């Protein structure tokens, strides 16, 4: 089998796996930014918290991975509720600068707290033995874990889309994103909706952070280091929708993976340049609404 | 209710309740005159020089960083451009001065000018491209500009030293006379003088019709378009000027410390300068003079114990500031003054 093909396969699978993680983390950010008009630079904190809970439970207490993932998702979603209530809510629709500062402050606090609680070192994700190694797939070897990430991601994405498109809760969210005042006028309890959406987004971020702990290493500076990537996904995808960030995540994931294999000396440079080009071409992102 | 509105009025100097008639006109006509309290920062700096001779290197850093915060105040506080990429210009200035000094041209003043020119060029070019955007898009674009430069500096390690930082800067004496001494006396006066000159420039700028039009653009861009203000041109001009000032600030720090590292271009740097500015108060010309010393002195005290906890406390104070004390230290002073009336 020709080498270029297997390289392309590896890049493709790795990129898609990374894209799933990016999407899970960023989708909540897109919805909260679109619905509440809140520039949330601290969204990565929830992903980081998910990663810490997962690795902590697995490494220190020997909890199986699936249970640890569920625990991390639920714990972070619950923990995000009081944060939304006390800190975020008062700044909805307010000054962008205040939002930037508040969330930047949270990022700094999270970095210090993580280092205090867990130390400065990276938290390794020790995968169960079945998930290590590769699987022979038609014309090349693919890491099992990448495959699992893609499958899990695809299932979650489908469930999320169906949920938002078909359920009453989803209809309320879409209504609030489209026209907040009208949604309030017809009796949707938007403050409760905000809290639930925020918790959902944070839980998904925690899930993404946990699942992706081997791709995006869990360390105290996680939220600051990866902030640009999460924001890029949202900015390219457009605010307040589900499909845009998905395509953006696939684009960024594949481009990132391809750059790292093919032109490592340019690293993230290409991603930033691409972001700039897309934002100049479509300031509201590929799928943003005018 | 009325007081609440006045507190929130961010127009610089318009804190006092506006009364109709000649008194108000008189106040507007005098607003650019020098006041006694404007000497306070400079007297304070000189007092610090006399009282704490052991801390002059830190004092020089503070003065240079005040200039950086002042440049951020110009775009953020006056023009209302929320930027997360001010470090792009700071770093450009620092690397320009540093590379010149490391390659045989250590003359400091011309180094500063070169740094200002390079940073202004980056500001102008990026401004032409991004300043038509607004809101989150603009925020992202400022961030991406800085990230692009950081990546470029990281990869061009042959010129910039990459991760290890720039090595071997040789800075000559100022005007061939004043050598940079170990105690930081020269550094202190150098930074003091440059900051003073730049402050005069910024002060002149914000009180000029140009500066007033910036405030107008910040407060109501639609109206400014309607009365025929060239909004894009004004924003681009102030963005370029601010970039040059940030570049000078970066060059000052590079020349006085003899070090340039990649973190001069980092998001952290852009974020902390905003934080320092907010602590003092945005859009007031003096926020930088209060916020930067507070932040940097506290950082010097606390981070010698444990740098990590420092970030926790600064993060917490940001959260508290936004939640309870909007407007920073100067905003609090205004509120106290209004309440005591």
Image: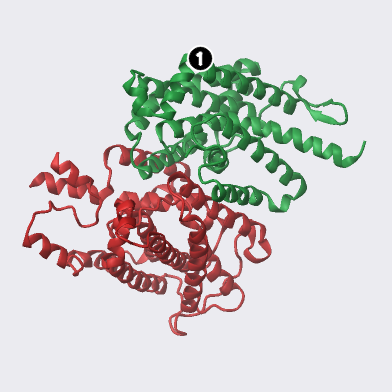
Q: From the viewer's perspective, is A257 left or right of B183? A: right
- Residue B293: tell me if it is visible: no
Q: Quadrant of the N terminus of chain A?
A: top right
Q: From the viewer's perspective, is B246 left or right of B101? A: left
Q: Residue B280 at what x, y percent from top left?
A: 30, 52
Q: From the viewer's perspective, is B184 left or right of B3? A: right
Q: Nearer the viewer, residue A287 or B313?
A: A287
Scheme of image coloration:
by chain
- The outermost residue toward the right is A1
The residue that appears at 22% across and 64% down in the rendered structure is: B40
Q: Secondary structure at mark 1?
A: loop
Q: Residue B204 at what x, y percent from top left?
A: 28, 70
- Residue B236: tell me if it is visible: yes
Q: Residues within 10 Å of mark 1 (few under 14, many from 20)?
A: few
- The outermost residue toward the bottom is B176
| Chain A display color | green
Q: Chain of mark 1?
A: A
Number of numbered callouts drawn: 1
| Chain B display color | red
Q: Residue B291 at what x, y percent from top left?
A: 32, 53
Position of residue A79 relative to residue B27, above or below, is above
The residue that disc 1 covers is A167
Q: Nearer the viewer, residue A266 or B112?
A: A266
Q: Residue B109 at what x, y percent from top left?
A: 46, 78
Position of residue B99 relative to residue A233, above or below, is below
Position of residue A35 relative to residue B314, above or below, is above
Q: Toward which corner of the image does residue A23 lie, by quadrant?
A: top right
Q: Nearer the viewer, residue A88 or B249?
A: A88
């Amino acid at each position: 089998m020709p080498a270029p093909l297997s390289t392309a396969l590896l890049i493709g699978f790795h990129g898609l796996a990374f894209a799933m993680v990016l999407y899970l983390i960023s989708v909540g950010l897109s919805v909260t930014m679109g619905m509440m008009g809140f520039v949330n630079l601290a969204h990565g904190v929830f992903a980081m918290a998910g990663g810490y809970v997962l690795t902590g439970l697995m490494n220190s207490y020997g909890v199986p991975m699936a249970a640890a993932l569920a625990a991390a998702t639920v714990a972070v979603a619950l923990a995000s509720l009081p944060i939304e209530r006390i800190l975020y809510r008062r700044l909805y629709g307010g000054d962008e600068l205040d939002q930037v500062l508040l969330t930047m402050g949270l990022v700094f606090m999270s970095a210090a707290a993580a280092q205090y609680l867990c130390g400065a070192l990276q938290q390794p994700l020790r995968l169960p033995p079945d998930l290590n190694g590769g699987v022979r797939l038609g014309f090349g070897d693919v890491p099992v874990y990448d495959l699992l990430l893609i499958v899990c991601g695809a299932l979650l994405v489908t469930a999320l889309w169906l949920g938002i498109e078909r359920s009453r809760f989803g209809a309320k969210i879409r209504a609030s994103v489209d026209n907040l005042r009208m949604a309030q006028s017809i009796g949707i309890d938007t403050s409760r909706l905000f809290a639930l959406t925020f918790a959902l987004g944070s839980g998904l971020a925690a899930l993404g952070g946990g699942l992706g702990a081997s791709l995006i290493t869990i360390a105290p500076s996680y939220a600051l280091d990866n902030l640009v990537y999460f924001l890029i996904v949202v900015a390219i995808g457009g605010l307040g929708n589900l499909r845009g960030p998905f395509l953006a995540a696939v684009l960024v994931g594949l481009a990132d993976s391809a750059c790292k294999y093919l032109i490592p000396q340019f690293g993230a440079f290409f991603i930033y340049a691409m972001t700039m080009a897309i934002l100049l071409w479509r300031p509201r992102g590929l799928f943003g609404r005018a | 209710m009325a007081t609440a509105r006045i507190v929130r009025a961010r127009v610089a100097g318009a804190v006092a309740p506006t009364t109709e008639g000649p008194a108000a006109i008189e106040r507007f006509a005098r607003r650019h005159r020098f006041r006694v309290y404007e000497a306070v920062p400079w007297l304070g700096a000189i007092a610090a020089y006399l009282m704490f001779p052991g801390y002059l290197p830190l004092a020089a850093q503070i003065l240079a960083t005040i200039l950086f915060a002042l440049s951020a105040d110009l775009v953020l506080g006056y023009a209302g451009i929320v930027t997360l990429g001010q470090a792009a210009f700071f770093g450009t200035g620092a690397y320009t001065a540093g590379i010149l000094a490391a390659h045989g041209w250590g003359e400091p003043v011309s180094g500063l000018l070169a740094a200002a020119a390079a940073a202004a060029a980056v500001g102008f070019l990026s401004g032409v491209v991004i300043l038509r955007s607004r809101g989150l898009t603009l925020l992202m674009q400022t961030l991406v500009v800085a990230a692009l430069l950081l990546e470029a500096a990281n990869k061009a390690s042959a010129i910039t030293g990459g991760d290890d930082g720039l090595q071997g800067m040789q800075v000559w004496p100022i005007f061939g006379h004043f050598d940079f001494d170990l105690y930081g006396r020269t550094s202190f006066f150098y930074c003091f003088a440059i900051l003073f000159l730049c402050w005069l420039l910024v002060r002149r700028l914000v009180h000029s019709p140009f500066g007033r039009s910036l405030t107008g653009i910040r407060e109501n861009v639609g109206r400014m378009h309607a009365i025929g203000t060239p909004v894009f041109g004004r924003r681009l001009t102030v963005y370029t000027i601010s970039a040059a000032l940030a570049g000078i600030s970066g060059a000052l720090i590079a020349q006085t410390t003899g070090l340039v590292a990649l973190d001069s271009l980092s998001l952290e740097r852009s974020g902390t300068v905003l934080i320092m500015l907010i602590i003092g108060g945005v859009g007031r010309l003096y926020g930088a003079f209060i916020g930067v010393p507070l932040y940097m002195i506290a950082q010097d005290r606390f981070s010698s114990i444990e740098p990590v906890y420092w970030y926790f406390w600064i993060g917490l104070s940001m959260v508290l500031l936004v939640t309870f004390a909007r407007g920073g230290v100067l905003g609090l002073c205004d509120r106290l003054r209004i309440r005591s009336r």
